Image (cartoon, helix red, strand yellow):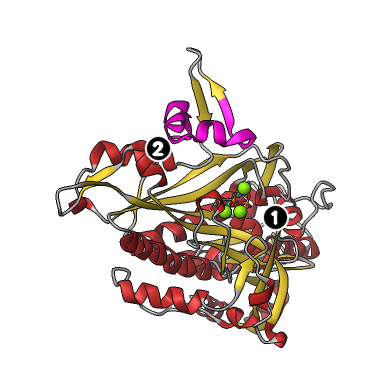
Amino acid sequence: MRLSRYFLPVLKENPSEAQIVSHRLMLRAGMIKQSAAGIYSWLPLGFKVLRKLENIVHEEQARAGHHAMLMPTIQSADLWRESGRYDAYGEEMLRIKDRGGRDMLFTPTAEELITDIFRAHVSSYKDLPLTMYQIQWKFRDEIRPRFGVMRGREFLMKDGYNFDLTKEDALHAYNRHLVSYLRTYERMGLQAIPMRADSGPIGGDDTHEFLVLAETGESEVFYDSAVTDLTFGDREINYDSVEDCAAVMEEFTSKYARTDETHDEALFNQVPEERRRTARGIEVGQIFYFGTKYSEAMGATVQGPDGKNTPVHMGSHGIGVSRLLGAIIEASHDDNGIIWPEGVTPFHAGIVNLKQGDEEADAACEALYSSLKLIGLDPLYDDRNERAGGKFAGMDLIGLPWRITVGPRGLKNGVVELTSRKTGESEEMPPEDAVKRLA
Ligand code: ATP
Ligand code: MG
Ligand code: MG
Ligand code: MG
């Protein structure tokens, strides 16, 4: 992309409404624009990152054997009356009437709708296990939308639902989701720690939230510092293996890590004192086993091997896709701007032409630009007629992992400069070598 033709409405000043760094940087880098409280337009740069996060989620869900689908944002209230949640959900639900006076709503989550699809089409245990998911906009009329995309009213969520014959099968699905989520967050350059959370009125232990540690997080968390040493890495996992998935679950959840809702002081005190940590975290996802709550209420049953009809065991599993942009920036920035992890960066590298209009510099930039594209990378070429200082500041703000600086002086010696956004270190080298380094 040539910056002169792109839509990147960068702000010079810090917007006064932004209280936390990720919100400030997303506004300043021209990624989002608020249209109403907690409701945002995604401008090209922000949308590009959002799409990258979605792709990672899709790839990891496919790897786990889950099927992508899409359900509508506007739903009829009738299904929610069946489950009893139309009244129970309260003020967070945006309720709408159509022209015929029928009660509709904007989906805050989709257990009812997916259960309705399931009961219409599945009647035998032979069609199980089954997990379907979508990445779709949700609306929750939060009392206090704030921190930009972190707590929006409209936000993008991946929500997945498993259907299984038995509790054991459903717990395998739960563990499988944990594994796929660990991989997903790591690919986004994030450490998200599974923490035991509150399952609310349903009871039981079977819910974990994934938290990214950050001072600006809205959750208070308590954990054994040993959990921060765990990484999933590039290990191969057989998602169909009950043992493999259970082993990962055990490894990642046996140490103390809880949100304030389930925090237990006595248990926490059994952690060696030097490893006890109290901190704040951002909830970027949650997995949940809830058994037959919806299947019983809505009559989603299958015929088992014994010929008897039984309600299916279900769970639901969410990732806050749009919130993740904020979480990644909270976890990865400096005073000058964003520092995108390689896996989610909107462009792979920026090319800065120090002297636009200089024949040699222009030609060298064009050559670099096409070479990078030729090897499948997506460069952003700052070809505007601007001062070098402004170009550098802009590149630092939008946070691409690499910058290649091209100017007449360097070119006299046959070199350009390759700079890492993360370390700030620069190295001079011939343009071909810079391309090779990024390949
Ligand atoms: P929170 O505790 O932050 O209100 P939640 O527990 O109500 O979140 P879930 O129902 O678990 O949310 O939804 C799955 C994921 O969707 C959450 O883990 C979070 O990452 C994301 N999410 C929830 N509410 C919002 C919101 N208002 N804005 C952006 N993302 C959200
Ligand atoms: Mg909530
Ligand atoms: Mg929560
Ligand atoms: Mg939650």
Whether the residue carrying mark 1 lies under 8 Å from ligand 1 is answered with: no
Please tell me which residue is depicted at 50% across the width and 63% down the height of the picture: 205
Please tell me which residue is depicted at 46% across the width and 69% down the height of the picture: 183
Position above or below: 340 against 224: above
- Which of the labelled discs sits on residue 384, or is there none? 1
Q: Is residue 108 magenta?
A: no
- Which of the labelled discs sits on residue 81, or is there none? none
Q: Quadrant of the N terminus?
A: bottom right
Instruction: Describe residue 276's horizontal placement relative to residue 433 as left or right.
Output: right
Could you tell me the amino acid type at mark 2?
Leu
Which residue is the site of mark 2? 113
Instruction: Describe residue 186's horizontal placement relative to residue 36 as left or right.
Output: left
Among the two numbered marks 1 and 2 on one chain, the one whose residue lies closer to the N terminus = 2
- Residue 291, image x, y percentages: 39, 53
Element type at marker 2? helix
- Residue 155, image x, y percentages: 58, 44
Observer able to see residue 358: no
**In the picture, residue 355 is in which quadrant?**
bottom right
Q: What span is colored magenta in the figure? A: 71-95
Answer few, some or many: residues within 10 Å of disc 2's Cα (few below 14, many 20 plus, some between 14 and 19).
some
- Frontmost residue, 46 versus 58: 58
- Frontmost residue, 260 versus 378: 260
Please tell me which residue is depicted at 30% across the width and 58% down the height of the picture: 166
